[in-house]
Amino acid sequence: VQLQASGGGLVQAGGSLRLSCAASGRTFSTYAMGWFRQAPGKEREFVAAIRWSGDNTVYADSVKGRFTISRNNAKNTVYLQMNSLKPGDTAVYYCAARSALRPRPIMSALTSRNTYDYWGQGTLVTVSS
C-alpha cells in the first residue's frame, strides 16, 4: 500500500484546512487509517483514526470537536478536516495505514504509531497567530 498525503499549507489561526491521503496498491487489504503529526523537536503524535469499514473513529483529546476524519472508499482516500486551527497545530501531518492481513486491533490501539504498517510522506501545516 502506498500513501500520498496532500492539502497542507499556511493558514491563520481560526482557519480551516482539509488534508487528503490517497491510498494505492493493495488497498483492499487496509483495515484502518490514521493521521499523526510531528512538530519541530517533538515526537510524532496521534491525531485521528478511522476503520476502513464502518463508522468507528477515534481522536486525540487535543483535536476533538475541531478535526473530523472521514473516508471515501470509492476513491481510496481518507480526509482530515481541520477547523478552528491553532498555532499549536503546526506540524508535519502524516497518514498511516494498518493492514487487514494482520490481527485486527481494538480501536484504542489505533492511537499508537506501532499499530500501523504503512506511512505517507507527510504534508506541512503551518498555523500563524
Image: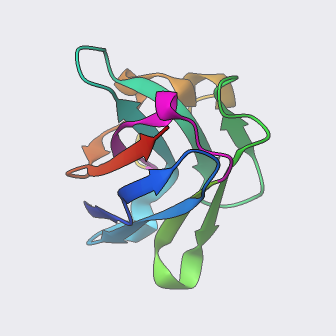
Instruction: Report the front residue among 105 and 88.
Output: 88
Q: Residue at coordinates 49% horizontally, 37% vertically from top-left?
A: 129
Residue 116 position by quadrant? top left
Q: How is the image coloured?
A: rainbow
Residue 91, relative to residue 27: is it above or below? above
Residue 74, relative to residue 83: is it above or below? below
- Find residue 48 and report its horizontal and vertical position in percent: 58, 39
Instruction: Report the front residue among 48 and 74.
Output: 48
- The answer to whether residue 95 is seen in the rendering is no
Residue 42, relative to residue 8: is it above or below? above
- Find residue 102 and report its horizontal and vertical position in percent: 41, 39
Q: Residue at coordinates 20% horizontally, 51% vertically from top-left?
A: 121
Q: Count of labels shown?
A: 0
State yes or no: residue 90 in magenta.
yes
- Find residue 13 and report its horizontal and vertical position in percent: 57, 44
- Find residue 109 and report its horizontal and vertical position in percent: 57, 23
State yes or no: residue 54 in magenta.
no
Determine whether, in the image, residue 29 is placed left or right of residue 59.
left
Q: Residue at coordinates 32% horizontally, 26% vertically from top-left?
A: 39
Magenta stretch in the rendered image: 83-100
Determine whether, in the image, residue 112 is placed left or right of residue 126.
right
Determine whether, in the image, residue 66 is placed left or right of residue 17.
right
Rendered-image quadrant of the N terminus:
bottom left
Determine whether, in the image, residue 96 is placed left or right of residue 82.
left
Q: Residue at coordinates 44% horizontally, 69% vertically from top-left?
A: 28
Residue farthest along the front direction in this orientation: 129
Residue farthest along the bottom direction in this orientation: 74
- The answer to whether residue 2 is seen in the rendering is yes
